[in-house]
Image (tube, rainbow, N blue to C red):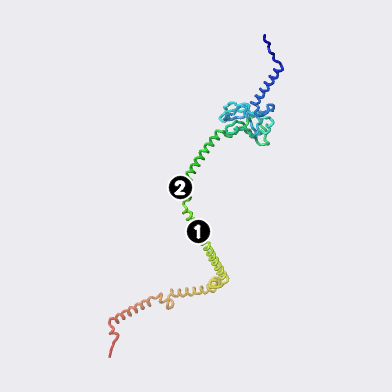
Amino acid sequence: MKKTTGVKWGNLKVGILLLFAVAVMFWASLSGGGTSIFNPKSSFVCYFRNVNGLVPGAPVWLSGVEVGNVKSVSFVNLDSLRQVKLVCRIKSSVWNMLTEGTKVQLGTIGFLGDKYVEIIPGPKGKPLITKGEVIPTRDAGSAEAVFKKSEQAMDKAKNIAGNLDTLLMRINQGEGTLGQLATDDRLYTEMTTLLSRLTALTADLQKNQERILTSIEKTANSVQSLSEQVNTSQGTVGKLINDPQLYDNLTAISMRMDSIVSKINTAEGSLGLMVNDTALYIEVTNLMNRVNNLITDIEKNPRKYFKFSVF
C-alpha cells in the first residue's frame, strides 16, 4: 500500500508568495509604464481623432521623461475630432507642471516604433489644471502622412534630377544658348573685345567730360567777369545799362524824329511838300515823258539836231 506524500505548509507559503510576486511584477509591467506602482498617480482625459495604434499601457512622456502610462483607450465618437478617449495616469509629483495652456499629442519612437503620449506643459505661473480634467490635444502628424510627404518630395527630387540631367546633356552637346556658351569660345572672344571697346569708350567719355567741365568753368568765369564789368559800368554794355546819358540821347533823338515825321505828315517844308503834294510828282512825270520823247526823236532824226561837216 502506497504512502501519500504530504505537502509541507512552509513550501506552500513560499510558492504562494512567489506566485503573488510574479503576478505583481506582471501587472506592473503592463500598467506601470516605467514608473513605480507605489508612486501616487493622478489622471487626466484627452480625445483624439485617430490614435494610430496606441494601446493601453503606452508610456506618457513629459519633456522627454516617462512620467506615466495610458490607463484606457475607448471609442466615444463625440464628433469628427473626438473619436477616441484616452485616460492617462501620471505621477502626482509632476502635476505642478500642468498649468493652463498644457496640451498633449501623440508621438512615435522612430518611424515604425511604439506610440506614446507626450505632454507639452503650459506657461509657468498659470493656474494648475484640475485632476481628471480634459486636456486639449495637438495634431503632430502621423507617420503615414510623413512617409507620404517624403514620397512626394522624393518624386519631385527625381523629376528635378532628371530635368537637370537632360539640361546638362543638352549643354554638353552645345544645344541652345547655354550650350553655345559652354562649348563655343567665339562669344568669349567677342565679349572680351566688347569689354576692351567699352573701356576705351569710357576713357574717351571721361576725357570729354573733363573738357566739357573745363569749358563750362571758363564760360562761368567769363559770365562772372562780364557781370562784374556791367556792375562797375565798364565797357559798352556796362555803360548801356548803368549810364543814363545814352538813354537821354536816345530819348532826344526820338523826340526830334517824331517832330520831323510830324512836319512831313503836315506837309511842312520841302520834304513835307514832296511827300504830301502831288503837283511836284506830276511835273516830274511830265518832264520825264518829254525827255523820253526827245531822246526818241534824236535817235530817229539825229541830223535834225546835230550837223556834221567834214570840210
Q: In the rendered view, does 286 fall on the left or right side of 69?
A: left
Q: Nearer the viewer, residue 14 or 2?
A: 2
Q: Amino acid at mark 1?
A: Ser
With respect to residue 79, does 281 lie above or below? below
The quadrant the C terminus occupies is: bottom left
Residue 171 placement (x, y as % from top left): 47, 47
Q: In the rendered view, does 155 fall on the left or right side of 134?
A: left
Q: Quadrant of residue 221?
A: bottom right
Q: Which residue is denoted by mark 1 in the rendering?
A: 196
Q: Which residue is denoted by mark 2 in the rendering?
A: 173
Which residue in the rendered view is the most extreme toward the front?
1
With respect to residue 118, does 196 lie above or below? below
Which residue in the rendered view is the most extreme toward the top?
1
With respect to residue 17, does 285 lie above or below? below
Q: Which mark is residue 55?
A: none
The local secondary structure at tag 1 comes to helix
The local secondary structure at tag 2 comes to loop
Q: Amino acid at mark 2?
A: Gln
Q: Quadrant of residue 14?
A: top right
Measured Cα–Cα span from mark 1 to mark 2: 30 Å
Q: Earlier in the sequence, mark 1 or mark 2?
A: 2
Residue 101 placement (x, y as % from top left): 64, 35
Discs 1, 2 touching: Cβ within 8 Å: no
The quadrant the N terminus occupies is: top right
Residue 103 placement (x, y as % from top left): 62, 33
Q: Given this view, does label 1 or label 2 mark the residue nearer the observer? A: 2
Q: Quadrant of residue 125?
A: top right
Q: Nearer the viewer, residue 53 or 213?
A: 53
Q: Nearer the viewer, residue 38 or 74?
A: 38
